[in-house]
Amino acid sequence: MRYATTRAVVLSSRPLAEADRWLTLFTRDQGRIDAVVKGVRRTTSRWGGRLEPFNVCDVVLYRGRSRVTVTSAQLVDVFHHLREDRDALTAAAVACEAAALLFAEGEPEVRAFTLLRSALRAIDAGFAGPALRAPLVLGSLMKLMYEAGYLPVLDRCASCGGGGRALAFSAARGGLVCGECLGDGVPVTPEAIAALRDAVTRPLSELRAAPPSEAVEEALRDLHLLFAYHTGTRLRALRFARL
């Protein structure tokens, strides 16, 4: 079927040619899709603003021989607050960039789509910052990684499987490691371990209300190492957040 209607989160947008844009969408029915929207950068375009990053839209997609084209879009959710607050913008960028890198193109990911939309709603509702120390940012990334099959091992040693005290986090081994299996692991504090476990078990609504902390920042650093290990790249949004 060449035409299809689906709900989508706009993950990113960049210029293409003189008047077009190249979009990365995360759709409810078809997963991640790269698509072109034509003429949207012309001053006479009436609907280009609907396809800004982080917006949720109902889009009509036309699948041609070599690429997908967006032929129309209707706004469903537009998150005003996160565009006005730097930390909220960082949080939204982390979630959307992670979704773009964690999931293959064209594979339906209904649970991941619902999670991403819920994360953007929670971010837009506001949280205590800064973003790098916010449990909501850590939780959004953790839960997306879970949906992608990359949940770190947090209940035992990821190397030997034992229940000894966790002293380090190893991306190559997939999570916490004990004193006998330190290897290339980076030291981890008990507080950061607790933050990682909270990110798995607590809902986004509770994480949004939780206070920021240095332990969360440490936990985010460790989780980002695991993310980079599996995807082969680091999140630019986190790098910019440190400027």
Image (spheres, rainbow, N blue to C red):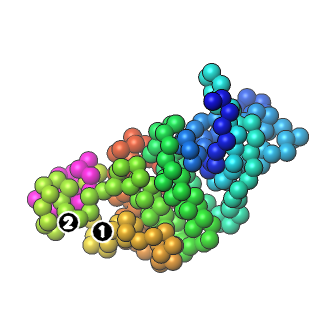
Vertical side of 113 occupied by 138: above or below: below
Query: Which image quadrant: the C terminus?
Result: bottom right
**Count of numbered tags:** 2
Which residue is found at the position 54% from the left and 75% from the top?
Answer: 128
Q: Position of residue 95 (x, y in %)?
A: 52, 55
193 with respect to 46 (left or right): left
Q: Would residue 89 be found to the left or right of residue 215 on screen?
A: right
Q: State yes or no: discs 2 and 1 in contact (Cβ < 8 Å).
A: yes
Membership of 124 in magenta stretch: no
- The residue nearer to you, when weighing 174 against 116, is 116
Q: Using the image, tell me which numbered label, if any, was put on residue 98.
A: none
Residue receiving disc 2: 166
Q: Which residues are magenta?
A: 172-187
Residue under the image location 49 percent in, 47 percent down: 109
Q: Is residue 174 magenta?
A: yes
Spatial CA span between label 2 and label 1? 9 Å
Badge 2 marks a residue whose secondary structure is strand
Q: Is residue 236 left or right of residue 183?
A: right
Name the residue carrying label 1. Answer: 193
In which image quadrant can residue 67 be found? top right
Tag 1, which secondary structure? helix
Q: Is residue 101 above or below residue 180?
A: above
Residue drawn at 51 percent across, 37 percent down: 105
Residue 198 percent across, percent down from the top left: 37, 71
Q: Inspect the image, locate mark 2, and give the three-letter code of the amino acid beneath it.
A: Ala
How far from the left and from the top, in percent, is residue 1? Answer: 63, 30
